[in-house]
Image: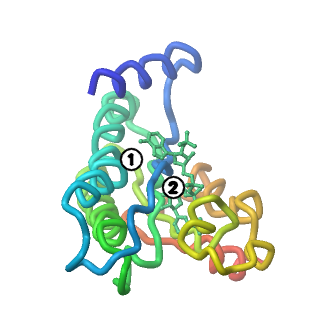
Amino acid sequence: MREVKRLVAEVCRVYGTIHVLVNNAGILGPREFLVDYPLSSWEEVLKANLTAVFMVTKEVLGVMMPQRTGSIINVSSGVGRVGKSRWGAYAAAKFGVEGLTQVLADEMRDYHIRVNTVNPGGTRTEMRAQAYPEEDPMILPAPEEITGVFVYLASPESQAETGKSFDARDWLKNKN
Ligand SMILES: NC(=O)c1ccc[n+]([C@@H]2O[C@H](COP(=O)([O-])OP(=O)(O)OC[C@H]3O[C@@H](n4cnc5c(N)ncnc54)[C@H](OP(=O)(O)O)[C@@H]3O)[C@@H](O)[C@H]2O)c1
């Protein structure tokens, strides 16, 4: 927790405050059946993909609550909404992120802090290549092609949106 506190303090020192938090960092973990899933990997993936979201968010709320505004965007996944074979702790953690988002959105309504999730969909990154080594990465959008929904949720345009689950690709399709 000491490092998280230092991170948030440093961002505030440099930028004055925090209006937007994107909880994006994550790890894949083994693509194993649950029956074979090692406990150590389970704990590692939950820590990086769910507990860390809680820790960073908790610290950032200390900045957002007094200013009574903010937008928290939690990066989820398709398997955080519909479970699939061999997605193990990764899927369980993303379901957790969806749940955390709904609870926090409800708790933060009076503070005008909105909390939503975004499923990026298959995107051309290292994690995707690790999960689907046979796939041609060039058939996937690059991260910079799916940022529209993030910009929308970070902007005052999305003031009414909270406790919702967005899909980056659907959002782009519906917008165009
Ligand atoms: N790519 C997809 O198709 C896809 C689909 C659905 C959801 N997602 C979600 O999108 C988000 C980004 O994934 P990605 O595809 O960009 O993955 P990625 O290529 O593996 O990048 C993961 C990022 O998370 C950071 N990270 C991992 N563990 C960390 C830790 N303990 N502390 C600090 N930073 C850490 C990494 O930093 P370092 O490089 O410094 O390690 C890296 O910047 C994740 O939440 C993932 O679950 C991705």
Label 1: few (<14), some (14–19) or many (≥20) C-alpha neighbours in 10 Å: some
Mark drawn on residue 159 = 2
Specify the quadrant that holds the C terminus: bottom right
Label 2: few (<14), some (14–19) or many (≥20) C-alpha neighbours in 10 Å: some
Mark 2 element type: loop
Left or right of 173 in this view: 5: left
Mark drawn on residue 166 = none
Q: Earlier in the sequence, mark 2 or mark 1?
A: 1
Amino acid type, callout 2: Gln
Instruction: Please name the residue that numbered disc 1 is placed on.
Output: 112
Quadrant of residue 104 within the rendered picture: bottom left
Can you say whether 92 is above or below 27 in the image? below
Mark 1 element type: loop
Quadrant of residue 139 within the rendered picture: bottom right
Q: Residue at x 46, y 71 (%)?
A: 77
Image location (x, y in percent) of residue 150: 61, 57
Image location (x, y in percent) of residue 3: 35, 23
Q: Residue at x 36, y 28 (%)?
A: 4
Can you say whether 55 is above or below 92 in the image? above
Left or right of 95 in this view: 70: right
Amino acid type, callout 1: His
